[in-house]
């Protein structure tokens, strides 16, 4: 945990289409619903976490890009969402060019970490969730260097373990070179289809390999979860009773439990 008491989680998987952004938005909403103070940082040029919460992408001086290149403090670009207790730092298309600019800067891998350190002195967030792009670039490295732990969404499909092994190697490298406190907070199985035997097989295989690192909660493949972003809403607001919403509420409870266990260990 950071010195300010914030718990910073990078939501990451180098494979695309596994539910990173969906998990970031809905986990953040579920955590806020039970009284946590949550900040979502959209660190992906696609900006889906931003638009998925009904926000516009950042305008001039108002996005993660300005924070990373140092022209704005994190506190200056935080936007209130319509969800009590949940704020967002929006993405912008400028992030597409951030990789080249960061490569030429001093301390290029720790710029988000430093921005969060300064934010922690003035805000009372208990959780910060960083939505990462589906690739290993300087945006992702900045998120991993800033985070206390990584939350890994893992789609229940054939190549899931292959992508996961790449991410675990990346986490080990970042831990050794940039952020010795980085750990795996947990792996959440997403897009689970109980009618498909492959989903069950993948879930069993992942649990066999990783054991207790895998959350008990499984996020089902659910049409309401897929529809919600087009309405600019987390699924918990779009349809609080659907299977996807209930799963994210259970996941939030499980994460809070796991965090408490870590603090008392």
Image (cartoon, rainbow, N blue to C red):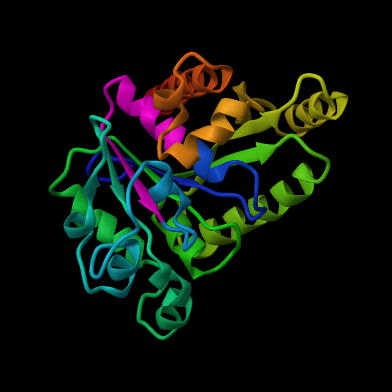
Q: Is residue 56 left or right of residue 15?
A: left
Specify whether 39 is left or right of 213: left
Q: Is residue 196 visible?
A: yes
The stretch drawn in magenta includes residue 91: no
Residues shaded magenta: 25-42
Q: Position of residue 55 (x, y in %)?
A: 32, 48
> Is 33 drawn above or below residue 9 in the view shown?
above
Residue 211 x, y percent position in the rendering: 69, 27
Q: In the current view of this chain or complex, which residue is farthest to the bottom?
A: 104
Residue 236: x, y in percent?
A: 43, 24
Q: Residue furthest front?
A: 231
Q: Quadrant of the N terminus?
A: top left
Residue located 70% across and 38% down the image = 155
- The residue nearer to you, when weighing 213 against 187, is 187
Please name the residue shown 76% across and 28% down the image.
Answer: 203
Residue at the image point whose x is 28% and y is 40% from the top: 6
């Amino acid at each position: 945990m950071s010195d300010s008491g914030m718990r910073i989680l990078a939501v990451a998987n180098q494979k695309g289409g596994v539910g990173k952004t969906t998990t970031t938005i809905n986990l953040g909403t579920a955590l806020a619903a039970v009284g946590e103070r949550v900040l979502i940082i959209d660190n992906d040029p696609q900006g889906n976490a931003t638009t998925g919460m009904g926000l516009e992408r950042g305008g001039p001086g108002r996005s993660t890009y300005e924070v990373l290149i140092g022209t704005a403090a994190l506190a200056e670009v935080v936007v209130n969402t319509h969800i009590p207790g949940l704020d967002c730092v929006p993405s912008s298309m400028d992030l597409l060019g951030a990789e080249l600019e960061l490569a030429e800067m001093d301390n290029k891998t720790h710029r988000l970490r430093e921005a969060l350190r300064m934010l922690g002195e003035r805000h009372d967030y208990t959780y910060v969730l960083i939505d990462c792009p589906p690739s290993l670039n300087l945006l992702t490295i900045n998120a991993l260097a800033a985070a206390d732990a990584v939350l890994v969404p893992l789609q229940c499909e054939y190549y899931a373990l292959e992508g996961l092994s790449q991410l675990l190697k990346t986490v080990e490298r970042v831990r050794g070179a940039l952020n010795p406190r980085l750990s795996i907070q947990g792996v959440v199985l997403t897009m689970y289809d109980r009618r498909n035997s492959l989903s069950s097989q993948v879930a069993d295989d992942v649990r066999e390999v990783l054991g207790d690192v895998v959350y008990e909660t499984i996020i089902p493949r659910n049409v309401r979860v897929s529809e919600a972003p087009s309405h600019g809403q987390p699924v918990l607001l779009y349809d609080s009773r659907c299977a996807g919403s209930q799963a994210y509420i259970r996941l939030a409870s499980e994460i809070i439990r796991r965090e408490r266990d870590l603090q008392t260990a």
